[in-house]
Image (spheres, grey):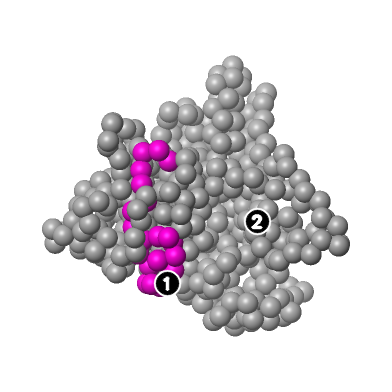
Amino acid sequence: MAGDRLGVGFIGSGFNAQFHLRSWVGVREADVLGFWSPNEARRSAAAALARELDLGEARPFASIGDMVADPAIDAIWLSGPNHARVENMEEIVAAIESGRGELKGLACEKPLARNVAEAKQVVALAERVGLRTGYLENQVFAPQVERGRELLWARGAATTGRPYLARAAEEHSGPHEPWFWQGRLQGGGVLNDMMCHSALVVRHLLTQPGQPLSTVRPVRVTSHIASLKWTRPEYARILSDRMKGVDYARTPSEDFASVLIEFETADGHTVIGEASTSWSFIGAGLRLSAELLGPEYSLQWNSLDSGLNLFFSRAVQGREGEDLVEKQNAEMGLMPVVADEPVAYGYQGEDRHFARAFLGLEEPLLTFRDGLEVVEILMAAYRSAEEGRTVEFPPQGLEDFVPAVARGEWRPPAPGR
């Protein structure tokens, strides 16, 4: 592949794009060459950071169409807000269909869309112009998940039988940007924002390496959502002060969600995935965890068991920041440090994989079709939570279903009920 490199443009220049950029120092097959976001200053700053990190001669573009039309741009990483997903896709496809440009691939951040109807629209748009697609799920590519899954299946499952129970969780103190907190824009609350990670991780762990996800088929979904912290009056006020346009006293979203997914495997077994997500977790910072259990073996992973800890006494004064761990909650005491978060959380692994996939060097592990099925599971979970019962998967009418949280109509039970 001498001289055959992928030129990548980003749609979006916020927190998520920054993680991708910092992971890109380990991606040898591709250069970051462009950015578009509606905020001119932010897209220019993102391009400057890419150049500073020596990732490529990145420059800001005035429009998505201009970026697609640039012959140096071979692929797009779509990491803008959920509510702009379909609009961004339409602009990409319009530029291709008009003959202004062409692409080798298109990668999209989680979740693929806010609901099933939008997700199907995204898939249809990509397929209409024959784009090779990649669904960006970083936790599947976390080194501990990859290596642990490989070893357990090769040693434990090969000799004593397949795993039967997987658990995953993602927990932190809340998102960075106001739109994440607004159900109408984001598509829901923490279930839509983060369960897309955990629900896919448990299925991935239960799937034999080298086999498709379809060999572990979801058949029933049970879910529960709640607002544990951010609708308490004192915290609703804090949130309103921090995040412009967010009013949890009037239009709350859930800050906790749990889901149990019953799967049937191609070899006739029933296996279970349990997942939970939270915006109401207070600890050192973001905590990712996973477990996989089988007849004679188990796996455990916790991202805060980082192997590096720092201690600061009360006399140490410092600014509030996230230089120790994402969603850092303290500046003193004994705190774990995740030394290279883009690697630990799987961003570097996924970015290198999809760059190679779009160059034709390997098959994409996850496509937009997989992203669509994740959205279907999320919507089934919302349906289960709203109806207070287990639902068969997929439940009827899922394409027309929009969660009450996303409609601005959800209210948590009153205290004492």
The alpha-carbon separation of the residues under discs 1 and 2 comes to 23 Å
Look at the picture and state if 227 lies above or below 367: below
Residue 66 coordinates in the image, percent (x, y): 24, 64
- Considering only order in the chain, which callout, 2 or 1, is on the residue closer to the N terminus? 1
The residue where tag 1 is placed is 41
The residue where tag 2 is placed is 323
Q: Secondary structure at mark 1?
A: helix
Q: Give the amino acid type for the residue marked by disc 2 in the picture.
A: Asp
Residue 144 coordinates in the image, percent (x, y): 60, 36
Quick check: is 417 in the magenta stretch?
no
Of the pair 140 and 224, the residue shown nearer to us: 140
Residue 161, numbered label? none
Q: Which residues are magenta?
A: 27-48
Quick check: is 44 in the magenta stretch?
yes
Q: Give the amino acid type for the residue marked by disc 1 in the picture.
A: Ala
Residue at the (71%, 69%) spot, across then down:
229
| Residue 112 visible here | no
Q: Residue furthest top?
A: 159
Look at the picture and state if 6 lies above or below 118: above
| Residue 6 visible here | yes
Residue 333 coordinates in the image, percent (x, y): 82, 55
